[in-house]
């Protein structure tokens, strides 16, 4: 996956916020996996994959409906933002142990 910036986290959190609560955990994992697969595809072929964009988390998130970005006063948005960060931490730990 390409380096993750604040906008990537925000876009992923907005994708989660637009999804039903029951689907958010699985969707957060899917977005990170999709970004990783897309980045590997770009590295291997030099071309963008047809679905998930350029290998950034933002591009993977933008392949889904996004909620309007609320402020951090919105508890559900904060929970989505936190979920993305926690999944990224787990992904980085898994990558570094491989």
Image (cartoon, grey):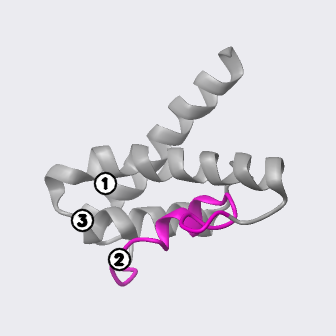
As helix, strand or loop, the secondary structure at mark 2 comes to loop
Q: Which mark is residue 19?
A: 3
The stretch in magenta equals 49-70
Say which of 37 and 69 sits in front: 37
- The picture quadrant where one finds residue 79 is bottom left
Mark 3 residue crowding within 10 angstroms, few (<14) / some (14–19) / many (20+): some
As displayed, is residue 90 above or below residue 82? above
Mark 2 residue crowding within 10 angstroms, few (<14) / some (14–19) / many (20+): some
Q: Residue at x 37, y 67 (%)?
A: 15
As displayed, is residue 81 above or below residue 83? below
Of the image marks 2 and 3, the number of the one nearer the N terminus: 3
Q: Residue at x 54, y 41 (%)?
A: 88
Of the image marks 1 and 2, the number of the one nearer the N terminus: 2
What x and y, as percent, mark residue 58? 58, 67
What x and y, as percent, mark residue 96? 70, 22
What x and y, as percent, mark residue 40? 72, 46
Most extreme residue toward the bottom, as rendered? 68
Residue 63 lies in the magenta stretch: yes
Q: Which mark is residue 65?
A: 2
As helix, strand or loop, the secondary structure at mark 3 comes to loop
Q: Are marks 2 and 3 in contact (CB under 8 Å)?
A: yes
Q: Which mark is residue 61?
A: none
Q: Which residue carries the number 1 mark?
A: 79
Q: CA distance from mark 2 to mark 3?
A: 8 Å
Q: Residue at x 41, y 63 (%)?
A: 13
Q: CA distance from mark 1 to mark 2?
A: 18 Å
Which one is in front in this view, the residue at disc 3 or the one at disc 1? Answer: 3
């Amino acid at each position: 996956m390409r380096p993750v910036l604040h906008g990537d986290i925000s876009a992923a959190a907005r994708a989660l916020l637009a999804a039903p609560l029951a689907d958010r955990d699985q969707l957060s994992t899917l977005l990170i996996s999709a970004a990783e697969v897309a980045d590997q595809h770009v590295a291997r072929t030099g071309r963008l994959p047809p679905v998930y964009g350029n290998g950034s988390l933002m591009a993977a998130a933008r392949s889904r409906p996004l909620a309007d970005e609320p402020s951090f006063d919105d508890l559900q948005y904060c929970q989505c933002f936190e979920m993305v960060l926690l999944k990224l931490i787990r992904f980085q730990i898994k990558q570094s142990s491989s």
